[in-house]
Image (spheres, rainbow, N blue to C red):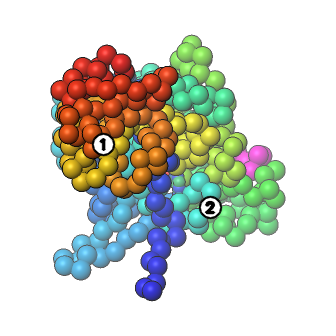
């Protein structure tokens, strides 16, 4: 026997049963995003490596060690499987001049790739649903995205499992000043810093604040906080955002240590977190990035967005029961080739009327086919045996009602189904 080829570590299939949860989740997202006027944009999975270096930042974990990058054999282009969606979306907005007629609100979905250590809720290929708005500066636009997410969690019955943390990291000058202040503080505490933090000290000191190392928590708690020294405009922006959230009954916690792992943010940053998934509890994260469009070659354009990690939400939804979601309306039991051919014709006619139809294809016994009809959750079993074939009849069994069986003329089958469904 040939060797069984396995999938790559951190890359997973989505089983049909789980796929139902995905569909359910995506349909809820699409309808909520639609209510708020977001339009879907399709984006490539492969982009130029320099897009992520310039966009996400060369000193982030993602760019330093997690990207799947290679040189194209044919033309030596340096390419990368996208580790996130924002940089590609910004590239598309600039390239297509999508803000030409004013602000635009977009969403995208699909796989992202990061070479991370694999654990529950952390994969190497994972999927995001991302939202980005371009051209809007008002704190109301940050607030609208957060309120929209809160509505989404409610529609999925997840609002009790997920909490919101927010912070403001000010503007570029604030960050530069704070960076220096933070490096000075950490340098005074080098004996407490772990190896990872020492490595980050001069490249990306703000990320040290995110460390979960228990030995560093006390020192991190006492570290200066950026939000305490941001400029007046940024402070006003943040206060106004908080007020809008309160007015709309969205609960949140101010987390002064929240900085996020990507370099493009300024002012608002936020994360939605659950306690039900162990250490990988962030189910969605985002914030404002008013300088990225310009940094990637576009005209200065304020922007704000977030991405939801679909797998993490699916793990939270796992216990939800969608048994009856996408099963057949009608199951056709047939015996022999001629009966099978007839079943196909009838099935196609019923599908023309938008019914979901399963034709049994395994030539099993009548009894076993009836069992399968029952399991499929179909409302009707249509039985086409020898006698029915000869006389252009169909036996229809109402398997979800009283189990009664009626003989129906083949030409009357549609109207019978319509009357009895
Ligand atoms: P991010 O925080 O890197 O942000 O990722 C967003 C979400 O994707 C995370 O909260 C998590 O749920 C999920 N996620 C990230 N890495 C993994 C992984 N290895 N396995 C499973 N799920 C994962 C961004 O990507 C930004 N582009 C979000 C954004 C959009 N900011 C502004 N606009």
Where residue 93 sits, quadrant-wise, is top left
Front residue (pair 299, 12): 12
Q: Earlier in the sequence, mark 2 or mark 1?
A: 2
Q: Position of residue 140 (x, y in %)?
A: 44, 21
Mark closer to the observer (2, 1): 1
Q: Position of residue 259 (x, y in %)?
A: 58, 46
Magenta region:
220-226
In the picture, which quadrant includes the C terminus?
top left
Q: Mark 2 falls on what kind of element?
A: loop
Residue 412 appears in view = yes
Tag 2 near tag 1, CB within 8 Å: no
- For disc 2, does the CB lie below 8 Å from ligand 1? no
According to the picture, the residue beneath numbered tag 2 turns out to be 119
According to the picture, the residue beneath numbered tag 1 turns out to be 385
Q: Position of residue 54 (x, y in %)?
A: 36, 58
In the displayed structure, 228 sits above or below 61; it is: above
Q: Mark 1 falls on what kind of element?
A: loop
In the image, what residue occupies the spot 35% across and 43% down? 333
């Amino acid at each position: 026997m040939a060797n069984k080829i396995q999938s790559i570590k951190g890359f997973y299939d989505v089983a049909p049963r789980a796929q139902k949860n995905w569909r359910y989740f995506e349909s809820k997202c699409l309808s909520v995003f639609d209510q708020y006027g977001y339009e879907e944009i399709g984006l490539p999975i492969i982009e130029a490596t320099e897009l992520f270096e310039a966009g996400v930042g060369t000193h982030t974990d993602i760019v330093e060690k997690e990207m799947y990058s290679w040189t194209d054999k044919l033309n030596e282009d340096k390419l990368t499987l996208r580790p996130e969606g924002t940089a590609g979306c910004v590239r598309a907005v600039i390239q297509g001049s999508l803000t030409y007629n004013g602000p635009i609100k977009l969403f995208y979905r699909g796989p992202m790739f990061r070479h991370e250590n694999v654990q529950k809720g952390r994969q190497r290929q994972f999927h995001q649903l991302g939202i980005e708005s371009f051209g809007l500066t008002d704190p109301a636009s940050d607030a609208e995205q957060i309120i929209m997410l809160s509505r989404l969690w409610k529609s999925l019955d997840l609002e009790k499992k997920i909490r919101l943390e927010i912070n403001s990291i000010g503007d570029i000058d604030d960050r530069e000043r704070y960076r220096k202040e933070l490096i000075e503080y950490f340098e005074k505490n080098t004996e407490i810093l772990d190896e990872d933090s020492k490595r980050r000290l001069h490249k990306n000191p703000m990320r040290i604040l995110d460390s979960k190392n228990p030995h560093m928590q006390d020192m991190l708690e006492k570290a200066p906080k950026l939000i305490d020294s941001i400029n007046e405009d940024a402070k006003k922006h943040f206060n106004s955002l908080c007020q809008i959230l309160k007015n709309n009954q969205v609960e949140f916690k101010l987390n002064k240590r929240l900085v996020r792992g990507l370099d493009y943010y300024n002012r608002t940053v936020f994360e939605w977190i659950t306690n039900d998934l162990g250490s990988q509890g962030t189910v969605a994260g985002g914030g404002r990035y008013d300088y990225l469009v310009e940094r990637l070659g576009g005209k200065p354009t304020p922007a704000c967005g977030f991405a939801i990690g679909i797998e993490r939400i699916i793990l939270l939804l796992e216990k939800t029961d969608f048994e009856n979601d996408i099963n057949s309306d009608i199951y056709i039991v047939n015996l022999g080739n001629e009966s099978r051919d007839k079943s196909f014709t009838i099935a196609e006619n019923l599908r023309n009327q938008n019914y979901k139809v399963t034709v049994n294809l395994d030539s099993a016994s009548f009894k076993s086919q009836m069992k399968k009809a029952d399991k499929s959750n179909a409302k009707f079993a249509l039985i086409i045996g020898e006698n029915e074939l000869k006389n252009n009849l169909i036996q229809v069994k109402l398997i979800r009602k009283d189990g009664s069986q009626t003989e129906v003329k083949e030409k009357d089958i549609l109207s019978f189904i319509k009357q009895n469904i």
